[in-house]
Image: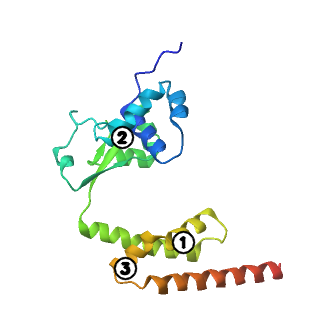
Amino acid sequence: MRTENNNIHRAEKLLAVRRLLDGKTSTKALARKLGTAERTVKSWVTLHKNGRLLKRDHHMWNPSWDRENVKVHPLDEDILVGIKKGRPNYEDSIISLMDPEVDAVNGVTHVEWTDEQIDRLLLWMVDRSLELIRDVALGTNEFQEELNFVNSPFFALICKSFGYDVDALRTGVEAEVAYMQIEQKEEKTIN
């Protein structure tokens, strides 16, 4: 019988839960990888859903992180690996660990979102998506992801909330894609 690994860093638990909830792995695969039982992984998910997987009683906990509009965001995997090893090896990991909103004990960052910041983010998502459709090669995963986003109800909701004509935007995107397809065919004909 295999013994269970009880020395799993909290950041690794949070990363495991994030990967599981994102559908990137299974409970069984995580348990095997981390050397723990499936029931243990399932307990982390339950703790996470109940808001109890984060450790709040550590000496670095900032009481301002408990405010209602402060949201917890998981750190990138390379940063979590650096935290676990105790020596980040990427420049951005080192910079991130100096950020006062980074909670290295839990492997997350705490961000306070104002209404204005949320509005800017939503507008950026629309702008960035349209830029990528214009600039990314046809047929790539990134291109398809952006087309899916433009055709999503969420895109329509953003546009509606800012007074944009979603149908006109989508028609413009369709025209641009059609033009890009014609250009691509002409390039193939020339070559």
Most foreground residue, 111 or 82: 111
Q: Secondary structure at mark 2?
A: loop
Q: Which mark is residue 25?
A: none
Q: Secondary structure at mark 1?
A: helix
Q: For the residue carrying disc 1, how many other residues have a C-alpha within 10 Å: few (<14), some (14-19), or many (20+)? A: some
Q: For the residue carrying disc 2, how many other residues have a C-alpha within 10 Å: few (<14), some (14-19), or many (20+)? A: many
Most foreground residue, 13 or 155: 155
N-term mark: 1 or 3: 1
Residue 106 visible in this rendered orientation of the protein: no
**Left or right for 73, reference 129:** left
Most foreground residue, 35 or 82: 35
- Residue at which label 1 appears: 132
Measure the alpha-carbon separation of dots 1 and 2: 30 Å
Position of residue 92 measured from the top left corner of the image (x, y, whole percent): 42, 49
Q: Are marks 2 and 3 in contact (CB under 8 Å)?
A: no
Position of residue 15 measured from the top left corner of the image (x, y, whole percent): 43, 40
- Residue at which label 2 appears: 107
92 versus 88 height, above or below: below
Quarter of the rendering occupied by the N terminus? top right
Q: What residue appears at the point 38 percent right and 74 percent down from the top-left corner?
A: 158
Disc tally is 3
Q: What residue appears at the point 53 percent right and 45 percent down from the top-left corner?
A: 24
Q: What residue appears at the point 40 percent right and 71 percent down from the top-left corner?
A: 124
Q: On the image, which quarter does residue 104 sit in?
A: top left
For the view shown, which residue lies furthest in the top direction? 1
